[in-house]
Amino acid sequence: MDAAATVKNVGSLWLKCTISFANVQTTGESDITKVLNVHKLPVGAASVEEGEYLGTMNELMADGKFIVGDGEGILALQDVAGDGYPATDSFILVIKMQEKAGNEYQDCGVSFDVFVNATQYTHEEDGFGNDQYDKDAVYKQVNVDYDENKTRQENGDALKDAIENAPDDAVIYVEGGFYDVTPGAGEEQSNLKIDRDNVTIVGSGNRQTSIEAHKTGESGDVQQTVLITGDNVTLKNLTISYVTGYDNKTLEIRGGDNAVIENCMIGSHEGTAVYIGETGAANYTVRGNTIVGDLCITNGAGNEGTTRIIEGNTFAGSAILLNGKGQSGGSYAWMQHDLTALPIITGNTFTQPAGDSAFPGSMQYYLRSLSYKNEGAPAEEQGVGPMEMVPQSYVDEFVKNNTFTQNQDFTYGLSSSDPARAFYGIGF
């Protein structure tokens, strides 16, 4: 097998880069990594003889890393080669089974990730003659290692500390493992609250980094496993769930603008998997995730923004809720949406219907819009007036641009308990 790669320094500091194998899983009775030779070839090479033999995969795993770049793994800054060092290294990584490997390796296999790791290198041309000038500069990659000798909650605390103390614009790489973010006795009663701006949290491999909570409440900061209140927060490659407790929200974006949720597994029970609320959440992107539980957009989220995207996700037995003006105990629980600010919902797959017991015969929907018409209500309860429903044209686009497990018809339903409560949706 072979793979082409380019490692490029686009920053303002010199880098020393290495490559390592991670998340290695072998199958079969023999360790096949012992007979897999690893070669690094220049782009365009016709055979492994034109490149550099690095060692067996097993040997490189034992060493922990191998270098990229020119000999020492050093990359100059910003596309400008300096002192004989390149700013970019393009190569082909080839893994070839040894021809002398015996029959004991039949039916054996291996899967793995390839990580590129970069650390600051203190050789620079802007140090006024001192190549240690930037040695104390903050490097904006933060690694969170999973410690198998610690409890899940101790590892969760380490994740919280990394997020709190990371520099602005940091990318936090979190090793695969289980991170329990449930607060301990006497601690602030919130799970994982990201109340800072400009941070990216990336899990390891294929959602092998699991963030979980065992205690959730009915309101405030304890009703979700992860709560985002900061702006420009990105989550990638994570599994986010609640294990026991009050089944409310798994991930909530409460007013945090420009949140990006990508390639995550979210939800585990019948509660809301993703909740986007408050007008401060003007822009949001939910892309490429698996979502178990409803995705709810409410409290005017998106009304003030230009980027409102829900695309390429898989919804398992769940729906998208576009909440309008709700009524609870004489007060209005949800702010009316500006119908020109509804999200773009495209390329999603809905694997099974989503039910709602509030309707006669348990009418089932993939897209729901909650509204109160307010007709006949006292003047003090009129709020903003009659609620507009999601238009037919929006529903038609939703049907056309997404994939469903059954053919659907546009339907309209009334709550059996309150005739003023209406849902439009995709039913069957």
Image: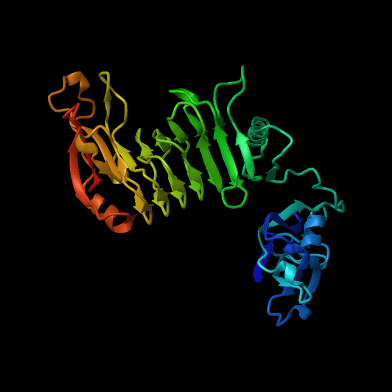
Q: Is residue 53 visible?
A: yes
Q: Is residue 255 visible?
A: no
Identity of the residue drawn at 69% across and 60% down: 9
Q: Quadrant of residue 27?
A: bottom right
Residue 359, given in percent of the width and then of the height, sits at: 22, 34
The mark total stands at: 0
Above or below — where is 395 with respect to 27? above
Above or below — where is 215 with respect to 354? above
Identity of the residue drawn at 43% across and 45% down: 291
Please name whichever residue, 77 or 320, is drawn nearer the observer in this view of the structure. 320
Q: Quadrant of residue 98?
A: bottom right
Colour pattern: rainbow
**Left or right, 412 with reference to 91:** left
Q: Residue furthest right?
A: 129
Please name whichever residue, 318 or 371, is drawn nearer the observer in this view of the structure. 318
Q: Residue furthest bottom?
A: 46
**Left or right, 257 with reference to 403:** right
Residue 40, given in percent of the width and then of the height, sits at: 75, 71
Q: Quadrant of the N terminus?
A: bottom right
Residue 392, given in percent of the width and then of the height, sits at: 20, 49
Q: Residue furthest left?
A: 376
Residue 62, given in percent of the width and then of the height, sits at: 81, 56
Above or below — where is 100 with respect to 167? below
Please name whichever residue, 141 or 403, is drawn nearer the observer in this view of the structure. 403
Identity of the residue drawn at 23% across and 40% down: 363
Q: Residue furthest top?
A: 186
